[in-house]
Image (cartoon, rainbow, N blue to C red):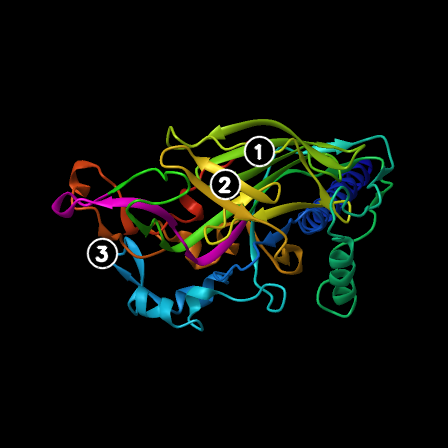
């Protein structure tokens, strides 16, 4: 009889622990989703930007796999599509249409809070800028209150004595159907092709030609969370370079720490010392006109020294990315969309290249489309 009682007590205790663990897991998963939306960036598209973002499914409706599946190529000629301002290459207005941002999430080892209360600081307005982005955030939240999305909360309070804490990193991927190349001054040498030459007194003593455009464009920024309702660090990517920032919970902004060049020896852009937030949580970033590289301040940014190439960004149109966030949980393959299995290039093969391209002179009017998310490296690791 005593043995039966002990067995029953142990069974009840085990079931209670399992139930608590399940509730705790569900609680932290909801908290992670809230944090991902609460800290999704406010991206300012450049003034005069023509090539806007687009959801992946609509892009896939307009391309087909070619070259044994190595490329997703447009069904129609690219130059013909570019002449049609209503073609899918021009994307959609994210401030009018709900264009998604894709949040690739990797959960790290569990952390626990045993001290009790854990609070998130109240959100503040975007500071140190002439543009009052607080109005944008307020409008978005008004939309959310009317049924669009109600994931962002002013504060999170947890009073459990032993609560799982969020420990993860997330990469926000933004997709554009077309990336516009750069116009550079070249000297046409006939059979030897066109060669870049410097401007003299601001004038081109040759021809202006555009190089480096491509169908398909993936841009990203990443955040790393470790136990708090604010990120520990942020990474912002611009072309083949990027910068690491740490979050200052007192000033509620991000402070520059380091940068890297992932590819190429001529890329070494200058990143600002601070990144400010809108609404006290959304990092404010600036998308370069045409090429969409992400910058942490408006203005003109030199990112290649030879030939000199610049990005221009500014307060054009706001994209509050948190309005439509599609979660991509890395550990749950069954929950990922089928396009996450594609390992080829998201765009057409290169065309209209330099006559000496086989010798390594890689100047093309249209370059290869980029690789997709599965082939990209993480900026943070657990």
C-alpha gap between disc 1 and disc 2: 10 Å
In this view, the residue in front, 46 or 62, is: 46
Residue hosting label 1 = 271
Left or right: residue 97 versus residue 365 is right
Q: Residue placed at 28% from the left, 44% from the top?
A: 186
Left or right: 224, with 164 as reference point? left
Q: Quadrant of the C terminus?
A: top right
Q: Could you say whether the residue bearing mark 2 is in a helix, strand or loop? A: strand
Residue 99 on the magenta segment: no
Q: Residue at x 30, y 55 (%)?
A: 71
Residue 33 appears at what percent x and percent y? Answer: 68, 50
Residue mark closest to the camera, 1 vs 2: 1
> What segment is highlighted magenta in the picture?
173-194
Quadrant location of residue 243? top right
Which element carries disc 3, helix, strand or loop?
Answer: loop
The answer to whether the residue labelled 1 contacts the one labelled 3, judged by CB atoms less than 8 Å apart, is: no
Name of the residue lying farthest toward the left: 191
Spatial distance from mark 1 to mark 3, Cα to Cα?
39 Å
The residue carrying mark 2 is: 238
Who comes first in sequence, dot 1 or dot 3? Answer: 3
Residue depth check, mark 3 versus mark 2: number of the one nearer the observer: 2
Label 1: few (<14), some (14–19) or many (≥20) C-alpha neighbours in 10 Å: some
Q: Is residue 188 above or below residue 304?
A: below
Disc ID at residue 76 = none
Residue ranking furthest to the top: 257
Circle 1/circle 2 CB separation < 8 Å: yes
Report the residue marked by disc 3: 67
Is 177 included in the stretch rendered in magenta? yes
């Amino acid at each position: 009889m005593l043995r039966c009682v002990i067995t029953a007590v142990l069974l009840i205790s085990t079931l209670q622990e399992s139930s608590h663990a399940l509730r705790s897991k569900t609680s932290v998963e909801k908290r992670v989703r809230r944090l991902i939306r609460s800290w999704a960036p406010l991206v300012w598209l450049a003034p005069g930007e023509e090539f806007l973002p687009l959801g992946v499914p609509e892009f896939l409706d307009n391309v087909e796999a070619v070259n044994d599946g190595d490329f997703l190529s447009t069904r129609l000629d690219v130059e013909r599509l570019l002449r049609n301002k209503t073609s899918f290459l021009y994307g959609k207005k994210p401030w009018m249409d709900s264009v998604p941002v894709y949040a690739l999430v990797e959960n790290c080892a569990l952390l626990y809070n045993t001290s009790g209360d854990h609070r998130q600081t109240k959100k503040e307005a975007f500071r140190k800028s002439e543009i009052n982005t607080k109005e944008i955030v307020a409008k978005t939240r008004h939309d959310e209150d009317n049924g669009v999305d109600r994931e962002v909360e002013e504060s999170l309070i947890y009073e459990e004595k032993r609560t799982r804490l969020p420990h993860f990193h997330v990469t926000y991927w933004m997709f554009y159907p077309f990336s516009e190349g750069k116009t550079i001054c070249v000297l046409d040498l006939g059979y030897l092709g066109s060669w870049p030459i410097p401007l003299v007194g601001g004038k081109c003593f040759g021809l202006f030609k555009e190089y480096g455009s491509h169908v398909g464009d993936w841009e990203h920024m990443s955040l790393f969370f470790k136990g708090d309702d604010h990120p520990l660090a942020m990474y912002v990517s611009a072309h083949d370079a990027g910068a690491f920032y740490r979050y200052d919970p007192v000033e509620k902004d991000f402070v520059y720490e380091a940068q890297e060049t992932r590819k190429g020896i001529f890329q070494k852009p200058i990143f600002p010392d601070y990144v400010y937030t809108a609404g006290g949580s959304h990092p404010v970033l600036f998308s370069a006109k045409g090429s969409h590289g992400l910058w942490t301040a408006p203005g003109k940014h030199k990112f290649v020294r030879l030939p000199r190439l610049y990005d221009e960004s500014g307060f054009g149109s706001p994209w509050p990315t948190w309005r439509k966030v599609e979660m991509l949980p890395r550990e749950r393959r069954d929950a990922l969309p089928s396009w996450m299995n594609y390992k080829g290039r998201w765009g057409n093969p290169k065309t209209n290249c330099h006559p000496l391209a086989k010798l390594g002179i890689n100047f093309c009017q249209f370059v290869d489309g980029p690789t997709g998310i599965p082939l990209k490296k993480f900026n943070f690791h657990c």
